[in-house]
Amino acid sequence: MGNFRKVFGAGKPVIGMVHLGALPGAPLHDPQAGLEGLVTAARADLAALQGAGFDAIMFGNENDRPYEFRVDTASTATMAYVIGRLRGEIRVPFGVNVLWDPMSTVALAAATGAAFVREIFTGTYASDMGPWTPDAGAAMRYRNRLGRGDLAMLYNVSAEFADSLDRRSLPDRARSAAFSSIPDAVLVSGQITGEAAALSDLEAVKKVLPDMPVLANTGVKHATVADVLRVADGCIVGSALKVGGDTWNPVDPARADDFMARARAARGGA
């Protein structure tokens, strides 16, 4: 938790997503646009989010469907290249997420100077990509070996595209992960990208973790951000900011502006 507050302060941060285009080797990669196309698109999204006043941004490879548990080295290297090209333009704290590979996520953070990471670090799942068993112990030790003990670790405890094989309730799993794996914050998600976490799930997790930041990780919309921030300690948003509200479109500056205006109002103008 200490790292979370060092990065975000005492408020309820709203983190906007920069969804990179499909990386080299991924089925949806556009070889004609190439690396310059990835940089150009990411730059436009970054400018829109910072212009709207988002508290932080996060780079992710959501377009690399189907996702991998151990990503190709080229994927991590390309993400580092794109972020490196934009590094001088980033004016807010930034994070990274290499789906669904905790070790590559931590490595990318170390290489780019990211302040925080998001990933599935704990649990056992049946997923669209096959059996899923991340190793929080390995990821946390890797973080420290790379000299990034300051890196804020945001643990998603309700994986998208998957069902937990752990029959404990979501609050019990969240409470156990907070005790055993020392995250800096816990994230609650819906079933897939862009789908909202149930407000009742956010409330239940926050009830058992009153002293730990609990954030909504998916599906927060313009109409719901006030209700979400009433319960959660922040949120991560991507799809609602895109042209037409479509996850795979570029960020719409007008939608981003409107979202942050509503978030600031919900936070009392902060």
Image (tube, rainbow, N blue to C red):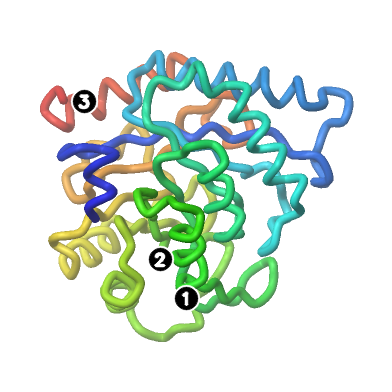
What is the CA distance from the residue labelled 2 to the residue labelled 3? 27 Å
- Along the polypeptide, which appears first: circle 2 or circle 3? 2
Q: Nearer the viewer, residue 31 or 220?
A: 31
Which image quarter holds the N terminus? bottom left
Q: Nearer the viewer, residue 262 or 140?
A: 140
Q: Residue furthest left?
A: 268
Residue 214 sits in quarter: bottom left
The three-letter amino acid code for the residue at tag 3 is: Arg
Q: Residue at x 63, y 43 (%)?
A: 61
- For mark 2, what is the residue? 157
**Contact, mark 1 vs mark 3 (Cβ under 8 Å):** no
Residue 252 visible, this orientation: no
Helix, strand or loop status at disc 2 = loop
The three-letter amino acid code for the residue at tag 2 is: Val
Helix, strand or loop status at disc 1 = loop
Q: Nearer the viewer, mark 2 or mark 3?
A: 2
- For mark 3, what is the residue? 264
Q: Residue at x 46, y 67 (%)?
A: 141
The numbered mark at residue 231 is none
The numbered mark at residue 123 is 1
**Contact, mark 2 vs mark 1 (Cβ under 8 Å):** yes
Drawn side of residue 264 relative to residue 68, left or right: left
Instruction: Estimate how packed mark 3 is, as few (under 14), some (14 to 19) or many (20 or more) residues with alpha carbons within 10 Å.
Output: some
Q: Residue at x 43, y 45 (%)?
A: 219
